[in-house]
Image (cartoon, rainbow, N blue to C red):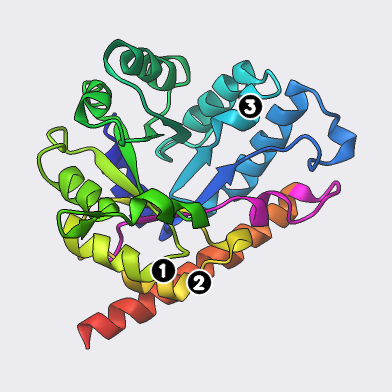
Amino acid sequence: MNFSLSLRQAWARADSMLCVGLDPDPERIPAALGRSPEAIFTFCRDIVDATAACVCAFKPQIAYFSAVRAERELERLIEHIHVQHPGIPVILDAKRGDIGSTAERYAVEAFERYGADAVTINPYMGFDSVEPWLAWEGRGVILLCRTSNPGGSDLQALNVGGEALYERVARLAAGPWNASGQIGLVLGATFPAELARVRAIAGNLPMLVPGIGAQGGDVAATVAAGLADDGWGMVINSSRAILYADPGARFAQAAAQAAERTRDEIRAARTAAWTTRAG
């Protein structure tokens, strides 16, 4: 298993940089499914099966499962993706961040218990909180860099020695920290100028880009800012706009249609950005 290779293959195979985020809120899933952990699994499984042809990755958010005691259902969901849709990487959105032996245990949770291909982590405790994750050969380690929430500026934009803190994170991720070659970065679609700055610093590192759809990020601006030299480079996440495209029995079909529209919008933006660069 090699996350970076799997991701490159998924981009090319699906002709897509869309990632569907799996954030199942029991209050928003169709009432006919119920509110049990099994309902959470059924809802997410059906979304996965309906949208798999459109995506380069899936991104389950661990809190939405653990908050309703659906950890076993998360294990089953990731296994389902791997068995029924092989080659589509699963990014576990956990945002863990701790030192030494605790980070090692978190890595066992993400990679061994859940079987994730990659995980999001918080790097702001320094390299000794990142290093244990890199021991898992071929697994992706995606560092929070410039996040899409407004409060991210409180710390990430601070000046540290003549550059913003998020720029320092990008520089470290692309350089001395990336001994495994499996590091990526989280960049919010709501800050396209800063996304472009990070792309200039970090080269072709893969970027997980939340913030389109319900959060209002502009797809064309995002793709133009973050496109890598090979014409790919981004995992552009949409969650609520796809998951809850229809509140009733047609939820899976509606999710597929929403995913197709989003994929096509990203494709068109990629073509336009690539044409502009070539011209």
Residue beneath label 3, please? Answer: 65
Left or right side of 250 for 231: left
The residue under the point 37% across, 31% down is: 117
Left or right side of 247 for 93: left
- The answer for how far apart the CA atoms under marks 3 and 1 are is 29 Å
Which SS class for mark 1? helix
Q: How many other residues sit within 10 Å of disc 2, few (<14), some (14-19) or many (≥20)? A: some
| Residue 232 located within the stretch drawn in magenta | yes
Residue beneath label 2, please? Answer: 218
Answer with the quarter of the image where residue 122 lies: top left
Residue beneath label 1, please? Answer: 222
Is residue 183 visible in the rendered structure shown here?
A: yes
- The answer for how far apart the CA atoms under marks 2 and 1 are is 6 Å
Left or right side of 33 for 210: left
Rendered view: 159 above or below 131: below
Rendered view: 119 above or below 156: above
Which SS class for mark 2? loop
Q: How many other residues sit within 10 Å of disc 1, few (<14), some (14-19) or many (≥20)? A: many
| Residue 165 located within the stretch drawn in magenta | no
Residue 112: image location, x then y, percent: 40, 15
**Which quadrant: the N terminus?**
top left
